[in-house]
Image: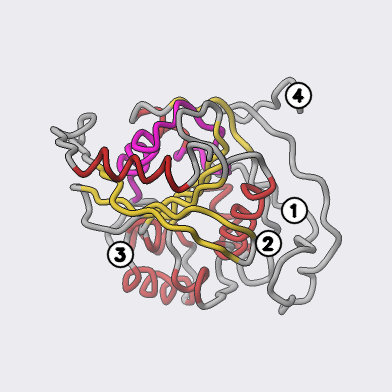
Amino acid sequence: MTNAGRGGLLDLVERDRVHECDGYGPAGVCVRVVGVADLPTRVGRFKIVAFWNNRDAKEHVAMVHGDVMGGEEVPTRLHSECLTGDVLGSLRCDCRDQLLEGLRRIQSMERGILLYLRQEGRGIGLINKIRAYGLQDQGLDTVEANIALGFRDDERDYAVAAHMLRSLTVKSVRLITNNPNKISQLEQYGVKVAGRIPHVIPPNEYNKFYLETKAKRSGHYIDMEGKPHLAEQSDPVMVDGMAGPAEEDPAETDARGKPTASA
């Protein structure tokens, strides 16, 4: 059995059972692996790894495919919880499509990790996210709505995510993201980001302005010309203009967005 098999990951549970941590980095973050199980999903089989941490009292998990322990340049996706998108299928964001496509892409690779982080509403929580939606209904964009509620554009912090990767003994990652802040924060917390894999999800009529705002005001690497909607999406198409043939994956880039030699 490979290291990423149940035995290898269970070794981390035993290791962390007696783990005493003074806290990693300036934030003093301590993370422990506390549970491992098989998780068959609609897109394939994964190992799900549960973590305890001393930072936010939230129950973050990792979806692990293949042999990642001690790995270098492990394809990794950081996905923030979104009840309205992930669970209820909201079209105001692209979170559900990002989650499912992230899992599919990792499943198609030799190995990979998706960290599911309990950071609802870019860190402001579900109630405040719904309040922000109400302000957007009145004409504010997503950045203006957060600021009007007294928050920054993005309140998420990736210190716990960085320590989760350390707990899985990952040496370096290729980050599946369009968000430069995820790259810079992971690097700030000591994770080596060896490259970036673009995560292209085309817009629909309800989230196009939201994605444009993320690109223009938050600096996300989003091509608003978009691609045809992913043909393999499991949910039926509900909005005109979202269907179309799948294209090849976007070229892989380095951590700063430049194409790699193999791209």
Q: Which mark is residue 149?
A: 3
Left or right of residue 221: residue 22: left
* Residue plotted at (26% across, 43% down): 31
* Residue 194 figure quarter: top right
In the foreground, 12 or 233: 12
Q: Which amino acid type corresponds to the residue marked 1 in the rendered image?
A: Gly
Q: Which residues are magenta?
A: 156-182
Residue 53 drawn in magenta: no
Chain-order first, disc 4 or disc 3: 3
> Callout 2: few (<14), some (14-19), or many (20+) C-alpha neighbours within 10 Å?
many
Mark 3 vs mark 1, CA separation in Å? 31 Å
Q: Element under label 1?
A: loop
Amino acid on which the number 2 mark rests in the picture: Pro
Q: Which of pointers 2 and 3 lies earlier in the amino acid sequence?
A: 3
Foreground mark, 2 or 3, reads: 2
Q: Is residue 111 above or below residue 91?
A: above
Dots 1, 2 in contact, CB < 8 A: yes
Dot 3 falls on a residue whose secondary structure is loop
Count of numbered tags: 4
Q: Residue at x 42, y 77 (%)?
A: 134
Judging by the rendered image, the residue that carries numbered circle 2 is 203
Q: Which mark is residue 262?
A: 4
Amino acid type, mark 3:
Leu
Mark 3 surroundings within 10 Å by alpha-carbon count, few (fewer than 14), some (14 through 19), many (20 or more): some
Earlier residue among tags 4 and 2: 2
- Distance (Cα) linking label 2 and label 3: 26 Å
| Of the two numbered discs 4 and 3 in the rendering, the one whose residue sits closer to the viewer | 4
